[in-house]
Image (cartoon, rainbow, N blue to C red):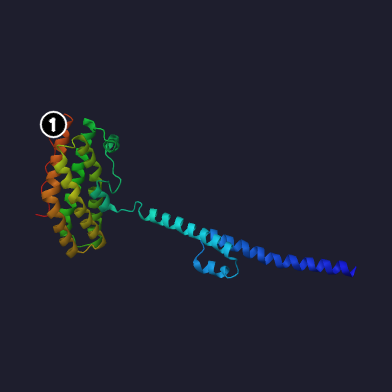
Amino acid sequence: MQFLYILSSLSLIGTSLSLPIDTRSNDLDLAVRNDANDAVLDTFTGELDPSTLATLTQDKAKADDNNNASTKASANGNGNGNTAKAAAGGNANGGKAAGGSTAAAASGKKPTANAVQTAADNFAKDANTVSASLNQLPSETDATKIKALATTAFKAESDEDAQRAVLFAADPNGGASANTKIVKNTPTVLDGLSNIQKNPTPQNVAKMVDTISAARNPQILPSITQLSNSAMKAVGLPAAAQKFPATNQ
């Protein structure tokens, strides 16, 4: 009877000793497989045999490589702001021309006459909205009104790019020069309007409006008319695009 008691006690002691070891082993495995840092790994390596240590080190190295690759891919993903999209020919605010013409332009198909006319009308409307804000901004002193005008102009300027894409798709050759000028100078307008939104003071308005007008008046405004007329001709419409007066004169 006493002998059986001794055997039972020894069995219980063995079980209690094995549990921490198993738990420690599981924790180590999870730590390594869940991309443990070097400090975690170092906690356990002092008690491992060389072959097991080598295997665990290799596993961690593979996990580190995978994690680094994912980080690099994420860093190279889309994160561009409004100005970058506009400069690259994208539409910063997701504006769309009517009738699905933006999709047609993106696919390389020539837009219909109706799509071109709609894009020209929308482009003119956006350009007039921006001009109205630029003409009014220098006379405003209230920060709230200044910010509101800059915001309205920014949205309209951003939407212009959807219309530009349609018009350029209608005549890529004849509209190349005008299209290039618009794309090249639009970031200056967007940056200036964004700057005014962030710092809506009369002093900053005066500086930014001058910078915007210096790029927009000679480069963008006449190019809108040229690009619109080129597209209209290409689809058999009369070249009757609006001409835009300079702002901040």
| 84 sits left or right of 234 in the view | right
Q: Closer to the camera, 247 or 28?
A: 28
Q: Quadrant of the N terminus?
A: bottom right
Q: Closer to the camera, 156 or 30?
A: 30
- Compared with 91, 98 (above or below) is above
Q: Residue 10: x and y, percent? A: 79, 68
Q: Residue 139: x and y, percent? A: 15, 59
Q: Quadrant of residue 169?
A: top left
Q: Residue at x 29, y 54 (%)?
A: 81
| 23 sits left or right of 237 in the view | right
Q: Residue at x 78, y 65 (%)?
A: 11
Q: Which residue is mark 1?
A: 238
Q: Amino acid at mark 1?
A: Pro
Q: Quadrant of the C terminus?
A: bottom left
Q: Residue 232: x and y, percent? A: 16, 33
Q: Residue at x 76, y 68 (%)?
A: 13
| 175 sits left or right of 54 in the view | left
